[in-house]
Each structure stands twice: as structure tokens, then as C-alpha cells.
Amino acid sequence: MTRALEPNTQDAARAAGPRARRLPATLAADLRRWAAELGFTALGVADTDLSAAETRLLEWLDQGHHGEMEWMARHGVRRSRPAELIPGTVRVISVRMDYWPAAAADARAVLADPDRAYVARYALGRDYHKVLRRRLQRLAERIAAVTGPFGYRVFTDSAPVLEKPLAQKAGLGWIGKHTNLIDARAGSWFFLGEIYTDLPLPVDTPAAPRCGTCRACIDACPTGAIIAPYRLDARRCIAYLTIELPGSIPVGLRAALGNRIYGCDDCQLVCPWNRFARPTPEADFLPRHGLDAARLVDLFAWDEATFLARTAGGPIRRLGHTRWLRNLAVALGNAPTGARVLAALRARADHPSALVREHVAWALERHASHPR
């Protein structure tokens, strides 16, 4: 989703040309102050040269590491060339917003309990797209109140945007070996958002990598998806397998999923920089419906109406009930063998969806051949 000024106003602003604008001398400082007032924890400005990132992106696509995420290739180089995506763009305002929910059940304890479901910490509360998009729009409106009408588009993981390379160029952090953005003072538990703009704002100094010889994230990945420093094969990534993959989860990777039913945080949980992570002050990102430590059998019992009601307004809802059951069936197949687990699986053995039936059958066979 994007937001913009009315086309005639936007076109008029662009017609004046970015170099013709005289921006207030205090605008760069004002941007940071306004961003903080809106709940963003950092703001930076980048130019639009992503040539190095474009090379890495094209290599990644050529190697097929995007799996079935065909939308990663659909827009070609417009993803790495902001001015081709939004004509007139000369700068990108990049922002961060922390989401670490300190009040949630201990992540490591949940992962260690095979009867409970692990949900990536970013997905426990309200859909971040909605939260950040509203705040970015308000930030753009505050800018317009000072500069007058200007051309812009607001993005929050919602269009072909290379948000992490842009954030690194804007000085918000460096891309770590797990391919997430890291800040030395705040770790990596944060969301990113952007405003593409025709305002010729002063740019910030890009952040330098500081991972050094550390390989904690590489060693911690349950499925070996981090195939080399800074190289992720999404086809093996649990976030891809449980969220993006529409069909069957490869049999050879199912056991490695453990009790992770929506995403995976292992690479972030072991990152030493996350000792500096700050708890989010945003109530919208706090856990809903006990999803931070729910029991697998309880979640597997949700019918579609319950699933839709309890995931309303959150990122999990886009998964759909069928893939929700698929993921839970795998987790139940990895759970300790017991009467409740077996009864739950048998109750779904004749589910209308072939996808669900396949994963339930695998789980039952796993318990029959390798009881735990």
C-alpha cells in the first residue's frame, strides 16, 4: 500500500524540480524530532544509488534463493532503482520502530517447550504495516506543513523496495550476516519504513558493518538457511516455509521446524548486539490472545471462524486457516507423543484440504514410527 498527495498537487510540486527548492535550514533536525514524537526510534536519509545492492539482488534471484516468491523478481530493477519505481524520487527517508515485546513469554523458554507454539515476536500483536503506515503518513504531512506540497510515497514492506540497503545507507544500521539490519545501540528487533521523496534533503553517513568474526546467527539457524555470511537461501528459511510458501513444506525440513509455527527468531535471539535491544513502548505490538506461549493442541482446535476472529488486525491472518493448520500439524508431529497430541491430529485426519491431510498424515506417521 502507498499514500500520496493528490496527483495534481504532486505533479505541480515535481514540476518545480527538486533543485529549485530551498528547504528550511532546520529541516533535517526537525525530521528527527518529529519522528521521535511519532514513536520512531531513529530516522535517516539516503540517496537512491543502490547499484551494489542491485548486483547482490540479481545474483540471489539468479540462484533461485527466493523460492516461490515470484514477486521478488516481478518488478525487475525497479526494486533497486527508486526513481524508476516512483519517478522524481531523489531521496529516501528511512525510519525504525522497535517491536521487542518485553512483556511476552520468554522466547527461549517457549522454544524449549515442544508442547507450546512459537510465533515470531514481531507477529504477536497488531499488524505493523498499519501502525507504521499511519505514522509515516503523519510524518509526511508535518513535512508538507513546513515545505509546502511535495512529491512522496509512503512504504512499509508493501512494495518493491530494498528497505534494508536503504536503511544502511541512511545510517540506521548495517546488514548482518543473517541479512537483518543491526544497530549497535538497539540490536535488530525493529521494523523499517520509508518515504520516497523529491525533496533534496542532506543525506546521512552509511553505517559500517560490525559483525566481525561472529557467526552465532549462522550456527543457530535450525535449517541451515544462512548458507554463507550475508547469504540467505529463503527456500530453507523457516519464515519462508511457514509464511510465504503456499504449498507443502519439504519433508526433509519438517523436523527442523520444531514448534515454530509462524516465522523464526533464532538468528536474532543469539545475536550479541541484541543485548542492547529496547522494549517497545507500543501497546499495538504486545501479545494478543496468548499467542506468545499458547499450546499447540489448543491452536490446532481453532476452526476458521475462531482463527479469523483471533488474528483480526494482525499479520498472522494473511496466512489463512489452511496454512495455519499445516504449520501446526508439523509442530504437533515434532511434539512429544501423547494422548492429546494424537487425538488432535486424528481429529483433522479427514480435513477437506489435501494440504492439511498430508501434513497430519506425516505427523501421525512420525509418532507411530518414532514415538517421543
Image (spheres, rainbow, N blue to C red):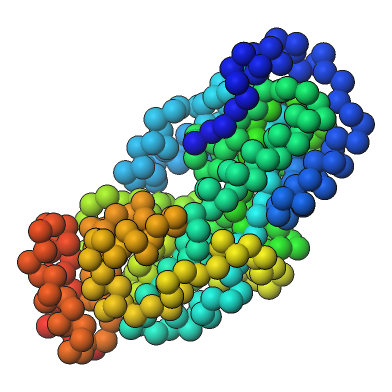
Q: Residue at x 34, y 45 (%)?
A: 67
User: Residue 289: x, y in percent?
Assistant: 42, 72
In this rendering, would 102 be left or right of 361?
Answer: right
Asked where in the image residue 87 lies, by quadrant, the reply is: top right
| Residue lying at the far top of the rendered structure | 15
Q: Give above or below for 200 relative to 237.
A: above
Check the image and report above or below for 249 versus 199.
Answer: below
In the image, is residue 112 above or below residue 174? below
Residue at (71, 34) in percent of width and height: 141
Tell me which residue sits at (22%, 66%) in the image.
Answer: 303
Residue 63, image x and y in percent? 39, 41
Does 257 sit above or below residue 181? below
> In front here: 223 or 27?
27
- Judge from the rendering whether residue 321 lies leftward or rightward of residue 169; answer left or right: left
In the rendered view, does 223 fall on the left or right side of 15? Answer: left
Of 156 and 220, which appears nearest the observer? 156
